[in-house]
Image (tube, rainbow, N blue to C red):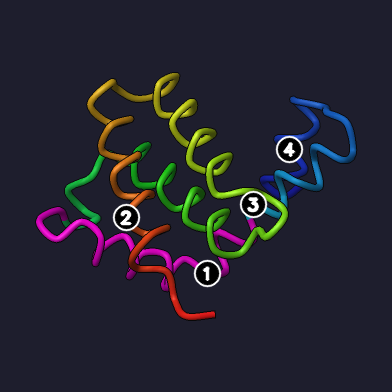
């Protein structure tokens, strides 16, 4: 059994939710090199290795939604990332994540 199948066997959800989550996970992983490059450029004095793992992964998912999930409005992508950060990280992390995602959204996203 793969990791996703095992997860879903323990946490069953509506098929639409499962599809959305799997799109986020697979898309984030598929675009991870580009996402990491954008995060690195947006955080001039922070290497990815210095970031808390939770924060780094919240940023990755947020960047994926900003750039490759056209059905998710940018404000929703950023707000959802902030809610996850508030729940699973620190208050300082949510401010950091907000600044990074806002900068990527406004300045560093690749030309379409």
Question: Which label sits on residue 6?
Answer: 4
Measured as percent of width and height from the top left, residue 97 is found at 33, 40
Measured as percent of width and height from the top left, residue 14 is found at 88, 31
The numbered mark, 1 or 4, whose residue comes first in the sequence reads 4
Above or below: residue 75 compared with residue 80: below
Q: Residue at x 77, y 34 (%)?
A: 8
The numbered mark, 2 or 3, whose residue comes first in the sequence reads 3
For marks 3 and 4, give the one nearer the viewer: 3
Measured as percent of width and height from the top left, residue 91 is found at 28, 21
Q: Main secondary structure of the magenta part?
A: helix
The numbered mark, 1 or 3, whose residue comes first in the sequence reads 3
| Dots 2, 3 in contact, CB < 8 A | no
**Side of 51 relative to 72 (left or right):** left
Q: Which residue is mark 3?
A: 24
Q: Is residue 42 magenta?
A: yes
Measured as percent of width and height from the top left, residue 111 is found at 47, 80
| Dots 1, 4 in contact, CB < 8 A | no
Q: Is residue 39 magenta?
A: yes
SS for tag 3? helix
**Inter-mark Cα distance, 3 to 4:** 17 Å
The numbered mark, 3 or 4, whose residue comes first in the sequence reads 4
Q: Label 2: how many residues lie within 10 Å, few (<14), some (14-19) or many (20+)?
A: some
Q: What residue range appears in magenta?
A: 26-46
């Amino acid at each position: 059994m793969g990791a996703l199948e095992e997860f879903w066997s323990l946490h069953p959800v509506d098929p639409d939710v499962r599809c959305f989550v799997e799109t986020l996970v697979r898309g984030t992983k598929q675009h991870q090199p580009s996402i990491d490059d954008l995060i690195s450029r947006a955080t001039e004095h922070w290497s990815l290795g210095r970031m808390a793992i939770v924060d780094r992964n919240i940023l990755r998912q947020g960047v994926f939604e900003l750039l490759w999930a056209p059905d998710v409005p940018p404000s929703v992508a950023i707000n959802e990332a902030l809610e996850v950060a508030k729940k699973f990280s620190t208050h300082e992390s949510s401010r950091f994540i907000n600044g990074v995602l806002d900068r990527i959204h406004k300045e560093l996203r690749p030309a379409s």
